[in-house]
Each structure stands twice: as C-alpha cells, then as structure tokens.
Image: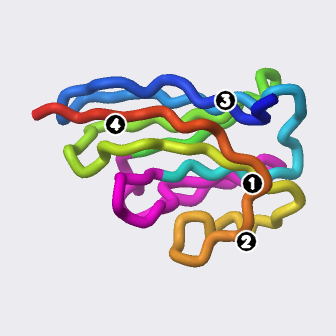
Amino acid sequence: QVPLVESGGGSVQAGGSLRLSCAADGYTFISHCIGWFRQVQGKEREGVASIYTSSATTYYSGRAQGRFTISQDDSKATTYLDLNNIKSEDAGMYYCASAWLVGPTDCSRAVTRSPPDFDHWGQGTQVTVSS
C-alpha cells in the first residue's frame, strides 16, 4: 500500500497552470510536514514547497515563491501544489513526501539543500511544459 498518492500532472503550455494533489492513503497527516519535490533525470532532487500541517505554515523555494502555492485540506488528508505561470524549467517529476513529528523549523528545511528525513514518498507525477 502506497501511503501517498500524487495526481494532477500532465502537459501544460508555458504560462499555464496545474494543480497537483497528494492524498494520504489510509492515515491522517496531523503533525506532519508535507513536502513537494521536483526531480529532473540526472539532476539532484530539489524541494519546491512544504507545509507544516499542524499550523498550515508554508515554505517555498526561491523558484516557487510567488508562483506556486501549497495548501492542505484536512478533511481529505490531501495536500495541493498549485503551479501558476509555469516556466519550462518547472518541468520534471514531482513527488510529495511526508515526515511525522517534524517541527516547523525542520519543515522549512525541506526547500533547502538540507531537508529533513521524510518517512513516506509518493510515486510521482510528471509535469511537461511546452513552449
């Protein structure tokens, strides 16, 4: 059983928008840090955005700030990543991950080069950008 299930990826034109979803399968994500990561083949995975679910505090990487929005729906145990004004460099495989009992300070590190350890990962959803 996969604890996290992503969806919403696809092909989009530059300047367009997409909503990615990350559903927690079979458990609640109270007291979790949920992170969204992007990976391009041959390159290091990078943190894009994270949310500390207990307070819904959000954190963004420099590339995501102002264009992406991470949010949560507690009733659905789902986290969303809205990608707006998409650029070609946003293309890649997007993964969500959860970390239990990670505080807000550590959750903020998800978008740095020193992220905390995440317990569960989804299978990823592909975002393709056309010009």
Percent of width and height locating residue 36: 56, 49
User: Which one is in front, 51 or 113?
Assistant: 113
Give the residue type that dot 1 points to: Cys
Residue 95 horizontal/vertical position (percent): 55, 44
| Residue on which the image places disc 1 | 33
Residue at 68% x, 54% y is 57
Q: Which amino acid does label 3 sit on?
A: Val
Q: Mark 4 points at which residue?
A: 84
Mark 1 touching mark 3, by CB under 8 A? no
The mark nearer the N terminus, 2 or 3, is 3
Q: Mark 3 points at which residue?
A: 5
Label 2 belongs to which residue? 106
Q: Between disc 4 and disc 3, whose residue precedes?
A: 3
Q: For the residues marked 4 and 3, what is the alpha-carbon distance in whole angstroms?
A: 21 Å
Q: Is mark 2 on a helix, strand or loop?
A: helix
Q: Residue at x 19, y 28 (%)?
A: 13
